[in-house]
Image (cartoon, coloured by chain):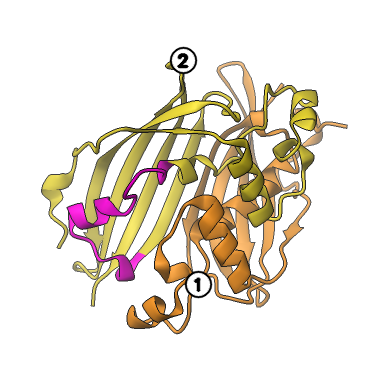
Amino acid sequence: MIDKSHIGHEFPSHSAVVEVGRLRFFAKATGNDDPIYTDASAARAAGYPALPAPPSFLFCLNNEKPDPLHWIDELGLDLGRMLHGEQLFVYFADVCAGDELTFTTSVANIYDKKNGALEFVVRKTRVTNQDGVHVADLQNTTVQRNG
Amino acid sequence: MSITFESINVGSELPALDVPPITRTTLALFAGASGDHNPIHIDLDFAREAGQEDVFAHGMLTMAYLGRLLTGWVPQRQLRSFNLRFLGITHLQDALSCTGTVIEKLEEGGEKLVRVEVASCDQQDNRKAVGEALIVFP
């Protein structure tokens, strides 16, 4: 069983820059041909200062650290038995190319179902930009299948 | 022509987004672009050792497709929240159909809001993920 004493644990914050090339690569990989996500002039015409980060992109930059899977070992999970259970984004302000974001994640909850056959880890992440503006919150629920 | 709050009814459907079948290339590109390098999605040997028959799609690939569904309907700036619950694994060669339905219209704190249920289904109409988006209208 995953040790519930990890509830409340805060991981070290990390920062990541929203890069134009990365946004274009993400648009390509997700089949997004809306020009506001790849063409700066189309983005500006839509009222953005630069290419906007699409709705689920903050999840990507949340992985942008030297060892993004380290938390799995830290909490004693097994990568091969893990599934993504649920993902939430709450948006407070635009995120665009050039922004430097800081991600601060903590363990919000750990619980199990079916007598421990399924274990759940809920992590919450607060995202702020270079001006200290709180731009978004993320919440990730990971499921581990036991047995 | 942008969509107005008044023109939307509970039960209104968003224009559906049909995605081409998922290939190994799709998953390799998404692993790189998303930064999710979990080998279960790209390394057949790892997936087999973990008891899977094959690699399978990242949940966040589906969420990116559903994000496209939403931003194809309203400007992204109108999006207040977006959540998705994964119900089943999306496999190679699955052709996802992404749909959205308005389930609630509400006015809260002087704001006009619309709640949309989003879902992805495979070619056999199995629901793979379901969630909600809250969208604000001027």
User: As drawn, is B97 to the left or to the right of A3?
Assistant: right
- The answer to if A65 sits in the magenta stretch is yes
In this rendering, does residue B37 appear at all? yes
- Confirm or deny contact between disc 1 and disc 2 (CB under 8 A): no
Q: Say what secondary structure mark 1 lies in.
A: loop
Range of magenta residues: A62-82
Q: Residues within 10 Å of mark 2 (few under 14, many from 20)?
A: few
Q: Which chain is orange?
A: B
Amino acid identity at mark 1: Phe
Q: Which residue is mark 1?
A: B56
* In this view, B33 is above or below A83: above
User: As drawn, is B108 to the left or to the right of B3?
Assistant: left
User: As drawn, is B113 to the left or to the right of A111?
Assistant: right
Q: Residue at x 51, y 59 (%)?
A: B31
Q: Colour of chain A?
A: yellow
Q: Say what secondary structure mark 2 lies in.
A: loop
* In this view, A16 is above or below B37: above
* In this view, B28 is above or below B93: above
Chain of the residue that carries numbered disc 1 in the rendered image = B
Quadrant assignment, res B22 = bottom right
Q: Residue at x 26, y 52 (%)?
A: A70
Q: Residue at x 46, y 19 (%)?
A: A130
Residue B39 coordinates in the image, percent (x, y): 41, 68
Residue A61 coordinates in the image, percent (x, y): 46, 41
